[in-house]
Amino acid sequence: MKLNLRKVLAVLVAAVVTLGASAQSLFIFGSFNGWDPANSLEMWKENGVYVMEDIEFGAGGNFAVSTKQSSDWGTVNSNRYGFAQDNAIATEGVAMKIVKGEGAMQVPAAGVYNIYVDLSAMTVTVKKAGKVTIETPAKLYVMGNLSVGSWDPATAVELEKIDDNNFSGQVTFTGAGDGYSYFAIAGAKGSWEAVNPVRFAPVAGEVAFNIDENVEFSKGEAAFKVVAEGTYYINVDFKNLTVNVSNYATGVEAIDVETATPVYYNLQGVEVANPQNGLYIVKQGNKVSKQLVK
């Protein structure tokens, strides 16, 4: 039988290409590592699918994958895969189509996820792996549309640490000019490079919430958005991972009776006749303070 040399060469080239594709590495990077492609994580391969488990994302967390690990964005992006629509939100547990391109992929909500990438089928699957755990920082700062250092992380206002899990402080919102006031909380102050890695964001994203409403937070860089201007208390609870803006600081200066009987309110602004163990807002004459009752 006479061999067709051109066909033989074509088969050999195809085999080499297939072997190269199956042997290539795939790296993942994103908001979880400060979008640093030089320190991306190498995914492992199981049954032809690239896998990376237990990545913790904050609210609005996103990621990308590339066959190259490099500090050069040109090299990384030319070998990168993602959603055709940049920063589209993945549906948990559903294999979603990806393309070769620079589009980021966003997780559905804050949490710990396993990521599966199938380059043969050109799909990515995002699955929830566990619950985000957040350690209470030693200090907590607030910045935003405030009367002090508007959106300047170097002059952020430090909140008082009430106990092992709670921070509180009085701030004045000045408004952003669109009917809302925005603020951020973080475990550090200084430059944005120092603040953003230890910043906390609302789980639901940048959605307006009301005064005295508890809002869940996780790690992330989105701002908190409130429908209010004026002076308020910001209360941050790391046990329940909630932020509450209380309006019981408003109008306090008008009270000038130093010997007045103390009145106790919980962090939702509800008056409590017989306070038990917990944290309370206490109004006594012209003084408002936070007290931990044990």
Image: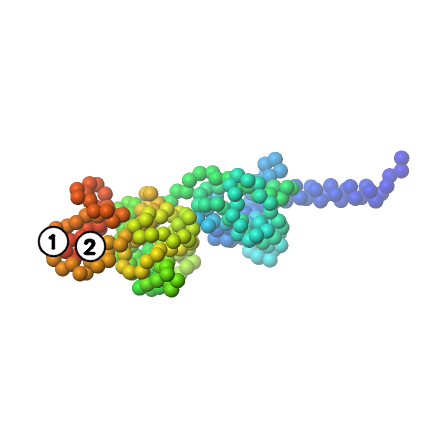
| Image coords of residue 64 (percent x, y) | 55, 49
Q: Residue furthest right?
A: 1
Q: Nearer the viewer, residue 86 or 226?
A: 226
Split into 4 quadrants, where in the image is the C terminus? top left
| Image coords of residue 84 (percent x, y) | 59, 51
Q: Relative to 178, is 96 on the left or the right?
A: right
User: What residue appears at the point 33 percent right and 43 percent down from the top-left corner?
Assistant: 240
- Label 1: few (<14), some (14–19) or many (≥20) C-alpha neighbours in 10 Å: few
Q: Nearer the viewer, residue 146 or 21?
A: 146
User: What residue appears at the point 12 percent right and 57 percent down from the top-left corner?
Assistant: 257
User: What residue appears at the point 41 percent right and 47 percent down from the top-left corner?
Assistant: 203
**Which of the 4 image quadrants contains residue 43?**
top right
Q: Nearer the viewer, residue 207 or 167?
A: 207
Amino acid, disc 1: Ala
| Image coords of residue 148 (percent x, y) | 31, 64
Is residue 68 shown to the viewer in this render?
Answer: no
Residue 260 circle label: 1
Q: Earlier in the sequence, mark 1 or mark 2?
A: 1
The residue at which mark 2 appears reads as 288
| Image coords of residue 18 (percent x, y) | 70, 42
